[in-house]
Image: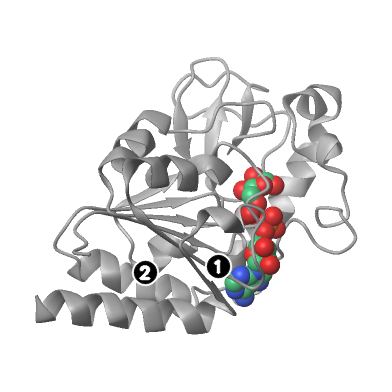
Amino acid sequence: MEVRNIVILTGAGVSAESGLATFRGPDGLWEGHRVEDVCTPEAFARDPALVHQFYDARRARLAEVEPNSAHHALARLDAEWPGELLLVTQNVDDLHERAGSARLIHMHGELTSGWCLACNNRFPWAGEMNASSSCPTCTAPGMVRPDIVWFGEMPYAMERIEEALQRCDLFVSIGTSGAVYPAAGFVQTARYRGARTLEMNLEPSQGSYFFHESRIGRAGILVPAWVDEMLAAQSAQ
Ligand code: APR
């Protein structure tokens, strides 16, 4: 089957080899916190200091990590693939862009971005955030929150993602457990549309049976090999 348009979905597993923790570890906690204590709008309303602390620590961690071979391989594919390509990440780290991926959507937001609830502006953010942080344009204090899509909130760019899924010939999922919708349902949309579907993960994901092919192993090994395959097949056409 000739492939022209590709949609790639990544999750925490793609950044694991850079040293960033995945979410659904064996203890069921997110870096020591219950999801409902730090990753919901209700949690932010109840205890903004705790939520800021949680994201401050994750934002600070970005300076200590580097993109790995999976991020670099995906950036190479982005640069060299002549057809349509969209990389949709659920990750809020900045490792895909630091590796050089340009056709990229952060559907669950970004640690390096702030969002002002007063004026609805989103802006680059570095360093800590707290109750007196203010937005660069409207300067309303206390209205800035992490630009992260929490449970119960709508992911970003769903229309663009849906359009790309409707046009893709190949859907690839990398390093995601398939536990969180709507991202977990992208494989079904792509399959109904007639795309070939491939997952690369350390273990079969929850929606594994929707994929035509599952490659089980580390993203840092599997992804560069797959990108080599794709670019070799492309140049042979
Ligand atoms: N290579 C490939 N896969 C890996 C690796 C690796 N080196 N290390 C771990 N994995 C796999 C795990 O086996 C697991 O299936 O990555 C997956 C990570 O799953 P989750 O921790 O559930 O992360 P993710 O799927 O990205 O979570 C989705 O849930 O909590 C919300 O908003 C948060 O974006 C996140 C979303």
How crowded pointer 2 is (Cα within 10 Å; few <14, some 14-19, many 20+) is rated as: many
Quadrant including the C terminus:
bottom left
Asked if the residue at tag 1 contacts the one at tag 2, i.e. Cβ–Cβ closer than 8 Å, the answer is yes
* Quarter assignment of residue 176: bottom right
Residue 217, image x and y in percent? 59, 79
Secondary structure state at the residue bearing disc 2: helix
Q: Which mark is on residue 14?
A: 1
Work out whether residue 33 or residue 27 is closer to the camera in this orientation and state it: 27
Residue 215, image x and y in percent? 52, 75
User: For the residue with label 1, is its CB less than 8 Å from the closest atom of ligand 1?
Assistant: yes
* Quarter assignment of residue 175: bottom right
Q: Which mark is on residue 74?
A: 2
Q: Residue at x 37, y 78 (%)?
A: 226
Kind of residue sitting beneath label 2? Leu
> Count the marks: how many?
2
Ligand 1 quadrant?
bottom right
Work out whether residue 146 or residue 149 is closer to the camera in this orientation and state it: 149
Q: Residue at x 20, y 53 (%)?
A: 84
Kind of residue sitting beneath label 1? Val
Q: Residue at x 54, y 36 (%)?
A: 114
* Quarter assignment of residue 118: top right
Q: Residue at x 28, y 70 (%)?
A: 77
Q: Earlier in the sequence, mark 2 or mark 1?
A: 1
Colour mode of the rendering: one colour
